[in-house]
Image: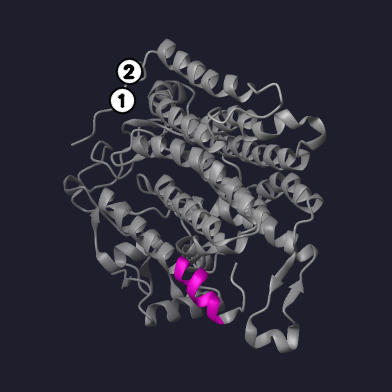
């Protein structure tokens, strides 16, 4: 049974605005109140982290109630899609999708690109938080103000805002893949510039068994900046290509954000160097509002989805992760939290690089009995002998290792049907057809399991390879 949809006017706007103003005043007024000697009052203000939590909570509530109010507005603007794996989408007796005279699929319209709402709410929270983040320095005067920290903070938000804008442009204009690779790189340039100005490290530690040859560390120089730029491109697109079922894009982002937050808390307890602890606090104050707004979006995007998040959310989430990892100096650890996304990318490469035919959409398909609600693998059809030599090698290797499901096509001599190369289809290949929400749960369980593996690698295996693990 479909969950009750929240109404946009369930919270009176005047009450919501009054609450935000009141809570902001509670934080701002004490922040500017000091003894005559210049010392801050001990009881006030609340810590910046507490203010961050309050703002995140308000942002979560606001996002929950704002999204339903914008659904019809998005649909009227033409930003909508049809959920192909639902019984509400019209099909003929053979199960084929039915289209109208304009060649559009007939079904319930679901608003697209709602990730822009959670992205904008995240930015609003962070903009409101900036005065509190540096409240400790106000009584000391401008001379002692940490201008470089403020620059880092604002530049991080600039990169995230750019990706929200570019993601929304992609949802509206349907940009080509080459643009999706170039635009995140450009949006990362201000971030990399600030990293360089702040004297960011560019060396990597060498494992114990290679220190006799390479030394204890290698300075990669400009190659390290190229790596960080590539990290931003990967994060924004990796989430985008592991998508296609209700709740998956936001769900995997929430799990990754929780993983980052857990790592930050562990590191704050482990590290003794104050600057490194501050790097992880920087990440925490970004992750808490991200989790708040994304959780609200997940509520509406969960099965059966009332809104689609669009490419906007994937760009926003990916850049947020890249920003905190780069400025928090744990970019290599971040990649460990992307193990399922890396596996999905590697598994998808033969189709992404056209060695094996790749349809426009590789999302799973509704089963032969639509009323059951179960979905199964989607397929591509091709003639193995007509593939590129490398494509034939990949096809034979995957088939022999049972990485794919392959069956011959009876009425096409020499042709085969093979599942599309995505982690979603591989999961359906292993576990069999299932309802869409259970598929999402299975995929998110894989993400959680890989997070556990990531922590084992980061803190246990690394201790066997390096003398010092920080």
Using the image, determine if residue 209 lies above or below residue 82. Answer: below
Check residue 460 for magenta coloring: yes
Mark 2 highlights which residue? 10
Q: Residues within 10 Å of mark 2 (few under 14, many from 20)?
A: few
Using the image, determine if residue 187 lies above or below residue 7. Answer: below
Q: Name the foreground residue: 451 vs 298.
A: 451
Q: Name the foreground residue: 418 vs 232.
A: 232
Specify start and end residues of the magenta stretch as a single range.
Answer: 454-464
Mark 1 highlights which residue? 6
Image quarter (top left, top right, bottom left or bottom right) of the C terminus: bottom right
Q: Secondary structure at mark 1?
A: loop
Q: Name the foreground residue: 8 vs 407.
A: 8
Using the image, determine if residue 404 lies above or below residue 22. Answer: below
Asked whether, in this view, residue 171 is left or right of residue 91, the answer is: right
Q: Secondary structure at mark 2?
A: loop
Using the image, determine if residue 250 lies above or below residue 263. Answer: above
Query: Residue 193, image x and y in percent?
Result: 78, 49
Q: Residues within 10 Å of mark 1 (few under 14, many from 20)?
A: some
Check residue 94 for magenta coloring: no
User: CA separation, marks 1 and 2?
Assistant: 7 Å
Q: Tell me whether circle 1 and circle 2 mark residues in contact (CB < 8 Å).
A: yes
């Amino acid at each position: 049974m479909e969950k009750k949809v929240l109404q946009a006017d369930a919270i009176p706007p005047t009450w919501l605005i009054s609450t935000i103003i009141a809570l902001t005043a509670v934080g701002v007024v004490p922040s500017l109140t000091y003894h005559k000697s210049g010392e801050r009052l001990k009881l006030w203000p609340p810590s910046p982290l507490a203010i961050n939590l309050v703002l995140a909570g308000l942002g979560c509530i606001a996002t929950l109630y704002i999204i339903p109010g914008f659904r019809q507005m998005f649909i009227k603007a033409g930003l909508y899609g049809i959920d192909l794996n639902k019984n509400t989408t019209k099909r003929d007796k053979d199960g084929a999708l039915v289209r109208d005279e304009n060649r559009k699929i007939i079904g319930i319209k679901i608003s697209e690109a709602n990730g822009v709402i959670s992205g904008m709410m995240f930015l609003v929270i962070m903009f409101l938080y900036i005065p509190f983040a540096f409240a400790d320095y106000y009584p000391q005067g401008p001379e002692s103000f940490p201008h470089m920290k403020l620059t880092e903070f604002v530049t991080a938000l600039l990169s995230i805002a750019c990706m929200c804008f570019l993601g929304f442009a992609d949802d509206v204009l349907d940009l080509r893949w080459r643009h999706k690779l170039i635009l995140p790189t450009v949006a990362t340039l201000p971030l990399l510039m600030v990293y360089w100005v702040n004297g960011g490290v560019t060396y990597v530690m060498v494992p114990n068994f290679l220190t006799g040859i390479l030394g204890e560390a290698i300075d990669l120089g400009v190659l390290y900046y190229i790596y960080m730029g590539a990290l931003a491109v990967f994060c924004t697109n990796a989430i985008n290509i592991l998508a296609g079922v209700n709740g998956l894009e936001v769900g995997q982002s929430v799990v990754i954000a929780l993983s980052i937050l857990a790592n930050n808390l562990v590191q704050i307890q482990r590290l003794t160097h104050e600057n490194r602890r501050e790097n992880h606090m920087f990440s925490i104050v970004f992750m808490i509002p991200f989790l708040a707004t994304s959780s609200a979006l997940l509520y509406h995007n969960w099965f059966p989805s009332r809104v689609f998040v669009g490419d906007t959310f994937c760009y926003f989430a990916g850049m947020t992760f890249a920003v905190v990892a780069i400025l928090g100096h744990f970019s290599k650890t971040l990649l460990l939290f992307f193990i399922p996304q890396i596996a999905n990318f590697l598994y998808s490469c033969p189709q992404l690089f056209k060695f094996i035919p790749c349809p426009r959409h590789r999302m799973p398909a509704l089963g032969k009995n639509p009323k059951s609600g179960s979905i199964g693998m989607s397929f591509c059809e091709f003639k193995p002998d007509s593939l590129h030599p490398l494509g034939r090698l990949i096809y034979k290797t995957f088939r022999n290792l049972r990485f794919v499901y392959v069956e011959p096509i009876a009425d096409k001599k020499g042709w085969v049907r093979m599942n599309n190369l995505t982690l979603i289809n591989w999961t359906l290949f292993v576990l069999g057809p299932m309802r869409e929400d259970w598929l999402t749960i299975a995929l998110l369980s894989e993400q959680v399991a890989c997070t556990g593996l990531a922590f084992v690698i980061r803190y246990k295996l690394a201790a066997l390879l390096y003398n010092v693990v920080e």
